[in-house]
Image (cartoon, rainbow, N blue to C red):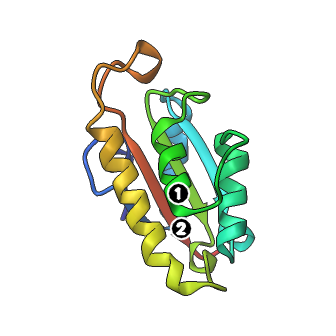
């Protein structure tokens, strides 16, 4: 069971698995917290291009985004246009993520852990980022 306490602190792990029942409590807690909440539907991201397209849209990546893992890593570790004290990405129907390109899934999960680690180690950020370590978690919700 994934809890709000796990996804609201800067420490890892930064990628969590959950079931639909866990989601309601987490969403309720997120509503009252100062968190940038992004929801993605795994049914919309069967390919790497579709995955990048959703992140470009949801995280407002710059026009020069390179549509590769290095560019994804760079853009997710910057987020200058979307400063927040905490970030939480919830991916429903996670079992469908990259289902058309399953060899890319381990890289994606590794990227998410690296991104969470980077934000957790952030320091001297401005007040719009909470002034220091920033929680950055992703929850993969399977089913429904």
115 and 97: which is toward the camera: 115
Left or right relative to 42: residue 107: left
Q: According to the image, label 1 marks what residue? A: 23
- What label sits on residue 141 in the rendered view? 2
The residue that appears at 64% across and 54% down in the rendered structure is 66
Judge whether residue 37 can be spotted in this image: yes
**Quadrant of residue 121 within the rendered picture:** top left
The dot on residue 92 is: none
Q: Residues within 10 Å of mark 2 (few under 14, many from 20)?
A: many
Instruction: Give the residue at x 56% y 34%.
Output: 31
Query: Residue 141 versus residue 29: which sits nearer the camera?
Result: 141
Quarter of the picture holding the N terminus:
bottom left
Q: Position of residue 79 (x, y in %)?
A: 54, 35
Residue 56, position in %: x, y?
69, 49
Q: Residue 18: where, in percent of width, then height?
A: 45, 67
SS type, badge 2: strand
Dot 2 and dot 1 residues touching (CB under 8 Å): yes
Q: Residue 85's quadrant in the figure?
A: top left
Q: Is residue 53 left or right of residue 84?
A: right
Q: Residue furthest top?
A: 127
In terms of sequence position, does the residue under pointer 2 or pointer 1 come before the other? 1
Give the SS element for disc 1. helix
| Foreground: disc 2 or disc 1 | 2
The residues tagged by marks 2 and 1 sit, at their Cα atoms, a distance apart of: 8 Å
Task: Indicate whether 77 appears above or below 51.
Answer: above
Question: Which residue is rendered at x = 61% and y = 84% of the image?
Answer: 101
């Amino acid at each position: 069971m994934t809890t709000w306490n796990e996804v609201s602190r800067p420490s890892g792990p930064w990628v969590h698995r959950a079931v639909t029942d866990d989601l309601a409590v987490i969403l309720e807690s997120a509503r009252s917290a100062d968190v940038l909440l992004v929801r993605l539907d795994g049914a919309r991201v069967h390919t790497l291009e579709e995955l990048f397209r959703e992140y470009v849209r949801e995280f407002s990546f710059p026009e020069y985004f390179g549509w590769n893992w290095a560019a994804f890593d760079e853009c997710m570790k910057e987020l200058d246009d979307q400063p927040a004290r905490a970030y939480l990405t919830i991916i429903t129907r996670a079992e469908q993520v990259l289902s058309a390109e399953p060899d890319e899934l381990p890289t994606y999960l590794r990227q998410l852990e690296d991104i969470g680690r980077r934000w957790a180690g952030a320091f001297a950020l401005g007040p719009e980022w909470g002034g220091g370590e920033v929680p950055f978690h992703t929850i993969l919700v399977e089913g429904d």
